[in-house]
Image (tube, rainbow, N blue to C red):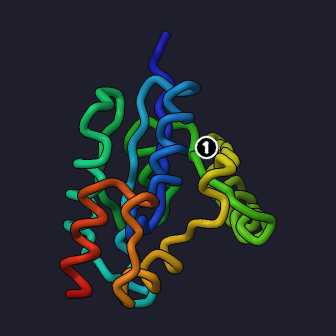
C-alpha cells in the first residue's frame, strides 16, 4: 500500500496559525503533506519573497516529520502529479473563500481528473484571520503575535520597522 500524499498549495504571504491548523488537520488524513508555496508572477507583489515564505513555513512546521515545504511555479495539478500526490488540500474560512476555491477545484478536476481537492474548514478561532488583514494590522504596528507562528510575527515586525 502506498502513502497518501497531499499538496497544500497557496501563496502563504504570510503563513498564519490558520494555515498551521489546516496542516495539523490534514496530517490526520494523509501520510505525507507538502506545503507548496506558489511562486506566481501574475499575482500582486507579495510582502515576502518565495524563499522567505518557504523558510518561515519550515520554521513553523519543524516539529512535524510528515510535512515537507517547497515552492513551485506553473499549474498546481502538474506540480502535485510530479510529486506523486493525488489530493490538493485547501482551507476555507467563509463562503466567499468557497466560491473562488470551488471554481479553481472544478478547473483542476477538468485538467487532472486523477487529482482530487479536499476542503478543510477553518477552526472557529481562525475564521476571521486572513493574510491581507494581518499585513494591514502589522503595517500599522499592531500586534499579530497570537495569530501567526513566532517566526512570522518577528518577520512581520522587521518588514514594517
- Name above or below for residue 103 compared with residue 23: below
Residue sitting nearer the eye, 149 or 33: 149
Q: Quadrant of residue 39?
A: bottom left
Q: How many discs mark residues in the rendered view?
A: 1
Q: Is residue 69 left or right of residue 76?
A: left
Q: Quadrant of residue 143?
A: bottom left
Identify the residue shown where x is 43% and y is 58%.
146
From this viewpoint, which residue is outermost toward the top?
Answer: 1
Residue sitting nearer the eye, 161 or 73: 161
Mark 1 secondary-structure assignment: loop
- How far from the left and from the top, in percent, is residue 29? 58, 26
Q: Is residue 91 left or right of residue 160?
A: right
Q: Is residue 146 left or right of residue 102?
A: left
Residue sitting nearer the eye, 109 or 92: 92
Residue hosting label 1 = 115
Picture quarter with the C terminus: bottom left
Identify the residue shown where x is 70% and y is 53%.
109
- How far from the left and from the top, in percent, is residue 32? 41, 29
Identify the residue shown where x is 67% and y is 45%.
120
Amino acid at each position: 500500500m502506498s502513502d497518501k500524499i497531499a499538496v497544500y498549495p497557496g501563496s502563504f504571504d504570510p503563513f498564519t496559525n490558520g494555515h498551521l491548523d489546516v496542516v495539523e488537520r490534514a496530517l490526520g488524513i494523509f501520510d505525507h503533506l507538502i506545503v507548496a508555496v506558489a511562486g506566481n508572477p501574475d499575482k500582486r507583489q507579495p510582502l515576502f519573497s518565495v524563499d522567505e515564505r518557504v523558510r518561515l513555513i519550515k520554521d513553523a512546521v519543524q516539529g512535524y516529520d510528515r510535512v515537507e515545504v517547497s515552492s513551485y511555479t506553473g499549474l498546481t495539478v502538474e506540480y502535485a502529479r510530479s510529486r506523486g500526490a493525488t489530493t490538493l488540500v485547501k482551507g476555507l474560512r467563509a463562503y466567499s473563500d468557497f466560491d473562488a476555491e470551488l471554481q479553481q477545484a472544478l478547473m483542476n478536476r477538468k485538467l487532472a481528473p486523477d487529482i482530487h481537492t479536499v476542503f478543510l474548514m477553518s477552526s472557529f478561532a481562525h475564521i476571521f484571520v486572513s493574510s491581507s488583514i494581518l499585513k494591514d494590522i502589522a503595517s500599522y504596528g499592531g500586534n499579530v503575535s497570537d495569530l501567526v507562528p513566532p517566526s512570522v510575527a518577528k518577520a512581520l515586525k522587521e518588514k514594517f520597522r
